[in-house]
Amino acid sequence: MSLAETAHARSADPRHGRTPRGRCPFHNPQPEAFEAWIERDLRCSAGRREFRLGRYFVSRFHDGAGYRQALQQFRKEVAGHRKTGFLALFEHDEARCRTAEDELRLLGAAMRDAGLADDIDTLIAGATLGVPIEVACPVTGLETTYQFFAVAFCRHAGDPGDPLYDPSLSAPFTAVNMTSDAFAFARFVNDQAVKSWGKAPYQMTHCRDALELLFRRCVIAWQNMSITTIRNYSRVTVDPARGVHLTEDHKRWVAAHNDPVFAELEKCPHVHEMPIEYATRLTAKWSDNLFDGKPYVPSRDGQAGGVPAVEVEGLSDELYEF
């Protein structure tokens, strides 16, 4: 739904840094509180852009059946190129949750009941929850199966005293956020092509140089949005060990969690690719398909998962030159 349609998506007052423990995050029935959070406290640049474009599907759910129903609608919205992201706000008795782990267990139970997971403990201890959605690729025009990954967001994850403190996985409400970085980037590229030429990329196959120049500019723009997002979260992190930061060459980012697993019960730094790596790889695949007739086989570009930092300690930067 668009921002104008979020009257039913209620959240805690974003004017406070933290919502008091035990207070229902949906006490304010007005959509202004939710929109204010998007404008002032949503630190993901790409996500904020999609909200402003009305391309984020927002829904509330009370149980697994409710989530499953909302997910079915989201699939249709993606297939129709109307939405790119799905934020499902979990309505529950907040008194039952004194820690982020309590919230994760409730969300895990809902995902199990929705038929998306077999076991709660496995899901919240580092499992990936991916949902395939078939849609015409915004760049190639071909029917493509994109993987959308669900990640849990918790109110208590913003509490420095919580064992699972991680501001980049916190929100003023308990929720599940589902996205596909590859599809979101494809939509971004399509937006820029339509803005520049009034045509989708797959309608510009007679202009390889122009389209590949557009690809390069889009990679840089997507990279800059990611850099802004990481710096936004770094500024609000109390414990640097739980923050996110860039490597010196800006090709990797480091977080206290593995993205995009659903949830984790132990925090460990992981190293992930930045867009300058994965988006460049994506655009090369699109060029090969559009201009050389090579098949486009999607992968988990952008959400391939991280590498535990302990495994790359001491390795020479020369390895990244291959």
Image (cartoon, rainbow, N blue to C red):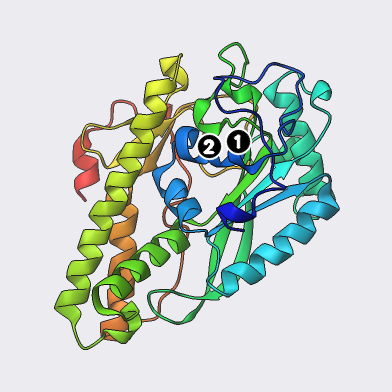
Q: Viewed as shown, does residue 162 lie left or right of 114?
A: left
Residue 93 visible in the current orientation: yes
Circle 1: element type:
helix
Q: Viewed as shown, does residue 21 lie left or right of 229?
A: right
Q: Quadrant of residue 231?
A: top left
Dot label at residue 33:
1
User: In this picture, is 135 found above or below 99?
Assistant: below
Dot label at residue 288:
none
Pointer 2: what residue?
Answer: 36
Q: Nearer the viewer, residue 67 or 296?
A: 67
User: In this picture, is 219 found above or below 191?
Assistant: above
Could you tell me how far apart the alpha carbons at marks 1 and 2 are, in whole angstroms?
5 Å
Q: Nearer the viewer, residue 128 or 238?
A: 238
Circle 2: element type:
helix
Q: Residue furthest left?
A: 209
Residue 281, percent from left and from top: 31, 61
Q: Quadrant of residue 30?
A: top right
Query: Which residue type carries mark 1?
Result: Ala
Q: Viewed as shown, does residue 76 lie left or right of 46?
A: right
Residue 250, percent from left and from top: 25, 39
Q: How busy is the neighbourhood of tag 2: few (under 14 within 10 Å), some, or many (20 plus)?
A: some
User: Image point 81% across, 34% down: which residue?
Assistant: 92
User: Image point 29% across, 71% down: which residue?
Assistant: 195
User: In this picture, is 48 found above or below 140?
Assistant: above
Q: How many marks?
A: 2
Q: Are marks 1 and 2 in contact (CB under 8 Å)?
A: yes
Residue 304, percent from left and from top: 46, 51
Query: Which residue type carries mark 2?
Result: Ala
Q: How busy is the neighbourhood of tag 1: few (under 14 within 10 Å), some, or many (20 plus)?
A: many
